[in-house]
Amino acid sequence: MAIIYMQGVSSQRELILGAKEIAFELLSSNSPIVIASHSDFRYEILQEADISYIEPKHDQAKINFLMDILSKHDIRVVHAGAVGHGLIHYQADLKSLGVRLIAGACSEQDFEIADNKSAFTNLMCEHQLDVVPAILIENQSRLEEALSSSPFSTFGANLCIKPVRGIYGLGFWRFKPDAPMNQHILNPNINVINPQAYIQAMKLSNNFKPQLIMPYFKGAETSVDMIVDEGQVIFAIARIKESKYQKISLNCDAIELAKKCAQLLKADGLINIQTINDESGKPWLLEANLRPSGGVCFSKASGINIAKVFFDYFYMGLTKEAILTKYTPLFKEVLIKVDSCAIPLLDNNSTNTIYHETL
């Protein structure tokens, strides 16, 4: 039997390595086959799997590709990666074949709520969960009006803005009225911009996309990685980002808030919820990513590899209680610094040559 990790937004390699670790520990002829697929020749990812495929580029073709190889490898679990939104329509068909689809959510509506940060904010407010308040900005005049009216004065004078849709933090800016007009050019990495410079840039672009204006909280941001089964949280671990460092924790207020959010969204799989603290240290929801985060591997420093937790639960079939019994004692609270690393690639003469196919 096999599991396939399809092309993801991030951390596909780490998920594969976690699965391979457990497969190696089993030391059995019945060890699971770990399959990877990607639409580009990402050798650092594909070389880690037992079998690897080059996916088609387009979503519908990816779905056809998956259906074609399911029976060939007796695939029992599909981590849908970036195509989860499209595969959700085939959930019942896959279930009838004995295949567990892990797409990130249980319905198209849940995906839409998470993708649309305005809808996400509104839903959390409706259910009285602490979420960073936001004003929807749909045009230039509304932008200028909001910036001149000092909204969210109870939270302080600082404001920030981000797109209604987007990932990787692209388009996020913190407004600073006394910043130089060219601050965003001199040092774009700090994401600070003079509000008048932002207004002028939007006027000149003639391509205004919906944005959210929010109060800017200066507290620590927390990234909560969770294993969730149709809204039931199985395991959660947090990375509290403090300056250049991250503290790994199993017990903090952000985790409890993130659990409520995941339950409400009926999340499904290895997902990520982000929160940020206000000046008093209280966490507020920022957004939900119904996919693995880019930093999902960092918790390994605490003794817990959540990629292995994912595999143990969804493929090996361990219960929630068994997961907690196995992994909780391994944990040690630790402070880490994230740095870059080099990944060695196998050469063409290696005995570990990976089998590739293109359909």
Image (spheres, helix red, strand yellow):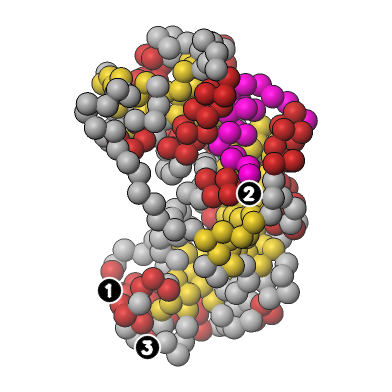
Which residue corresponds to mark 2?
A: 302
Q: What residue type is labelled 2?
A: Ser
Q: What residue type is labelled 3?
A: Pro
- 49 over 331 or under it: above or below: above
* C-alpha distance separating marks 1 and 3: 19 Å
- Mark 3 residue crowding within 10 angstroms, few (<14) / some (14–19) / many (20+): some
Kindly give the residue lying farthest to the left in the view shown.
348
Residue drawn 56% across the image and 59% down it: 336
Residue 208 appears in which quarter of the rendering? bottom left
* C-alpha distance separating marks 3 and 2: 42 Å
Q: Position of residue 11 (x, y in %)?
A: 45, 42
Q: Position of residue 353 (x, y in %)?
A: 29, 23
Residue drawn 43% across the image and 77% down it: 192
Q: Magenta stretch?
A: 303-321
Q: Which amino acid does label 1 sit on?
A: Leu
Residue drawn 51% across the image and 17% down it: 32
In the rendered structure, does residue 305 fall within the stretch colored magenta?
Answer: yes
Image depth: mark 3 or mark 2 in front: 2
Q: Earlier in the sequence, mark 2 or mark 1?
A: 1
Q: Where is residue 141 in the image (x, y as percent from the top left)?
A: 43, 74
Which residue corresponds to mark 3?
A: 180
Which residue corresponds to mark 1?
A: 204
Q: Are marks 3 and 2 in contact (CB under 8 Å)?
A: no
Look at the image and tell me whether residue 93 can be seen.
no
Q: Which of marks 3 and 2 is nearer the N terminus?
A: 3
- Mark 2 residue crowding within 10 angstroms, few (<14) / some (14–19) / many (20+): some
Residue drawn 66% across the image and 67% down it: 277
Kindly give the residue lying farthest to the bottom in the view shown.
178
Q: Position of residue 181 (x, y in %)?
A: 34, 86
